């Protein structure tokens, strides 16, 4: 039985990943920041899909101490940790000249610094087991940039370099570290965008539609599997052909 912690799995892409892994027989640690009811729903659905063990954990990953505590709690509850999916993320969009320090700091702390700390603690456990998978959820915003998202794009681009570096450090221990870079995926995060922006994106996507969380989840599940053992340090774009264009 493989054991996975999926950050931000109360909703959206993280929820879909938790359910995909549950359906594949993983024990899953569901994590949320504030939305406990949604996390409990994910956990119940994961159990119904056949996960042998489901636990639920709260952690505000904008806080520096939260990451280490989360890995400790999840690995203790699951009896170990084989897979870490760093999915939790926030946006605090705004043009650079109007961006507040707090908006920058919160996005970097939650989307990048927390991933560093979560991964550091998880890798220690994976090294002992000589097997592990870390999958970081980046974004095409980190590859192509996005007006109004200097903080978010910097964090997501940071994940790409982080992924490459950590992949090199632990490859010989049976641990792979990869990233996925989704384009526009239907979720609460993108539902919050103005309709005009959504329509503009839609026009630019060669597939002619937005992606679904379940599609990202299948890619993450593949990277978590034994079949993906020789893929390491990569950032795999999943965006219906939007980037590169
Ligand atoms: P959602 O907004 O739907 O869900 C965000 C998740 O992150 C929730 O589980 C939320 O928990 C959790 N979260 C929010 N703030 C914190 C915090 N401070 N500490 C810990 N957890 C927190 O996001 P998506 O599913 O759309 O996105 C998931 C990931 O995919 C993010 O990293 C995002 O950047 C990335 N992504 C999304 C794309 C998209 O088009 N949707 C495109 C490219 C990348 P709670 O429910 O408790 O608030």
Image (cartoon, rainbow, N blue to C red):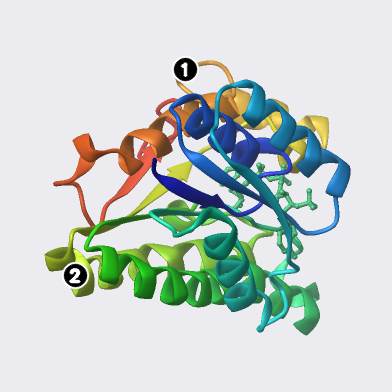
Report the residue at 58% width, 77% height from top: 68
Q: Residues within 10 Å of mark 2 (few under 14, many from 20)?
A: some
Task: Name which quarter of the figure residue 63 lies in.
Answer: bottom right
**Going from the N terminus, do you reach mark 1 or mark 2 first?**
2
Badge 2 element: helix
Q: Where in the figure is residue 190, as x and y percent of width and height? A: 72, 38
Residue 95 location in percent, x, y? Answer: 73, 65
Q: Is residue 36 left or right of residue 145?
A: right
In the picture of the structure, the residue carrying the numbered disc 1 is 207
What percent of the width, then of the height, locates residue 193? 78, 40
Q: Is residue 77 visible?
A: yes
**Is 136 in front, or is 70?**
70
Q: Is residue 171 left or right of residue 118?
A: left
Q: Which mark is residue 168?
A: 2
Q: Any mark on residue 16, and which? A: none
Disc 1, SS: loop
Query: Could you tell me which residue is drawn at 79 percent across and 40 percent down?
Result: 40
Measured from the top left, where is residue 78 in percent x and y?
53, 54
């Amino acid at each position: 039985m493989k054991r996975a912690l999926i950050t931000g799995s109360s909703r959206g892409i993280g929820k879909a990943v938790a359910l995909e892994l549950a359906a594949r027989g993983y024990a899953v640690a569901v994590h949320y920041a504030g939305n406990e009811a949604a996390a409990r729903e994910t956990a119940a659905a994961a159990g119904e899909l056949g996960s042998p063990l489901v636990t639920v954990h709260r952690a505000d990953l904008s806080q520096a101490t939260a990451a280490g505590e989360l890995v400790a709690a999840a690995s203790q509850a699951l009896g170990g940790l084989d897979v870490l999916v760093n999915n939790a993320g926030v946006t605090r969009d705004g043009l650079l000249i109007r961006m507040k320090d707090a908006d920058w700091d919160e996005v970097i702390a939650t989307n990048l610094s927390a991933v560093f700390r979560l991964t550091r603690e998880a890798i220690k456990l994976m090294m002992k087991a000589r097997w592990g998978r870390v999958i970081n959820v980046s974004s095409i915003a980190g590859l192509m940039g996005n007006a109004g998202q200097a903080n978010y794009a910097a964090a997501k681009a940071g994940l790409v370099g982080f992924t490459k570096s950590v992949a090199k450090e632990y490859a010989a221990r049976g641990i792979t570290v990869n990233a996925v870079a989704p384009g526009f995926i239907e979720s609460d995060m993108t539902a919050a965008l103005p309709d005009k922006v959504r329509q503009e994106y839609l026009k630019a996507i060669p597939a002619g539609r937005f992606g679904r969380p379940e599609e990202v989840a299948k890619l993450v599940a593949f990277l978590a599997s034994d079949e993906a053992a020789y893929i390491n340090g990569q950032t795999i774009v999943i965006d219906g052909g939007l980037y590169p264009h």
